[in-house]
Amino acid sequence: MPSSWMITGKEEGNSGADFGMGKKGIFGGLNGAMAKFYATIFGVPKEKEVFHGPVLVRRGQNDVALRGNIFSINNGGLPKRDYSVVSSGIREFDSLISSGGFEKSSSILVSGGAGTGKTTFTMQSIYYSIVEYGEKGIYISFEEDTQKIKLHMKNNYGWDFDALEKKGLFAILKIDPVEVSRAVEEFLLNKNGELRIGLEKIELPFVPDKIVVDSLSALAIAFSDDQNYRKYIRELFESLEALNCVSYLISETEQDPKIYSRSGVEEFLADAVVVLYNVNSSGKRENAIEILKLRSSSHRKGLVPYYFTPKGIAIQSKKT
Ligand SMILES: Nc1ncnc2c1ncn2[C@@H]1O[C@H](COP(=O)(O)OP(=O)(O)OP(=O)(O)O)[C@@H](O)[C@H]1O
Ligand SMILES: [Mg+2]
């Protein structure tokens, strides 16, 4: 069967999250070289065969994608999607973007080296989005202890996430990446067997306006097979998009990165890539932020310096 059916975006099945991805999926609308490039990374199904079961989609003997939502919402369904522009919550950062912020339903890869401020930047975005714009936020940690994160945010910047949590405006979840990878890999192993186990969903207490996944790197190293990790993160991006919120996916890199993610696929899946640098300038370490990619708007190009202050990150957005 021709492989082009999935690349040209013909709708197959009813889920944008299945292997064919449909019109709005990552293969949709691609042509020629780019389509081939994606197909090389993700693999092209050999035959069209779709099972509309609860979690399994099969198109060829070896091609099984996870399907359906990775998240479930406590006492509720998924919101309707819209693509309105919302503030990042950090005014100086918004001023780098012509449209003034991020689209809802968009995914932002936040890449940077150790200690460059990935947690600070994303928590600052959530904090000010809550206190100044009446939003709600969720932070998913695959690494750090949640109490520790909140304590550091309070001690370092004065942001009281405990108080926001008590008001039901913020939630922080700790998830063991090994449990995720084990469940996914077991699920994929059992794809041809009798036992078709369902993947346990990550239950969110409410529909957030902003969500952080910290980090994809921690998730990646928990997987024994890169292909399985790729399948999972593709679903993760789709599932986050379905929440109709701004989602930040943190990626740990070198201090002055040339590669922005573990598998190299993440920056293609994301709607935006924001890089935090820690560069060596004449023996001094300096921080700079760069919007490397933003699908929804034109934006400032190049590195913009930022500093850590007792109120969070201050971005020197005005050109001097
Ligand atoms: N109040 C403050 N004033 C100045 N700098 C601060 C302050 N609080 C934190 N920092 C700086 O913030 C850095 C840590 O920021 P953050 O935890 O957001 O980084 P990260 O990129 O998430 O780190 P990791 O890679 O460990 O996850 C520290 O290395 C420190 O230099
Ligand atoms: Mg961090």
Image: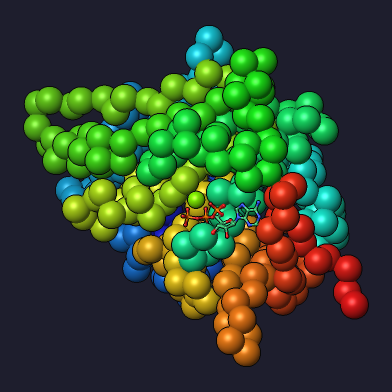
Q: Is residue 312 above or below residue 302?
A: above
**Quarter occupied by the C terminus:** bottom right
Query: Does residue 33 sit above or below 92 in this rendering?
Result: below
Q: Quadrant of ligand 1?
A: bottom right
Residue 150 visible (yes or no):
yes
Residue at image coords 64%, 70%: 287
Q: Position of residue 256 (x, y in %)?
A: 52, 76
Left or right of residue 312: residue 28: left
Where does residue 302 sit, x and y in percent of width and height? 72, 76
Q: Position of residue 98 (x, y in %)?
A: 85, 60
- Say above or below: 193 vs 206: below
Q: How many marks?
A: 0
Among all residues in the image, which is located at the extreme left? 193
Q: Front-most of 145 and 214?
A: 145
Occupied quadrant, residue 313: bottom right
Q: Is residue 111 left or right of residue 132?
A: left
Residue 144 sits in quarter: top left
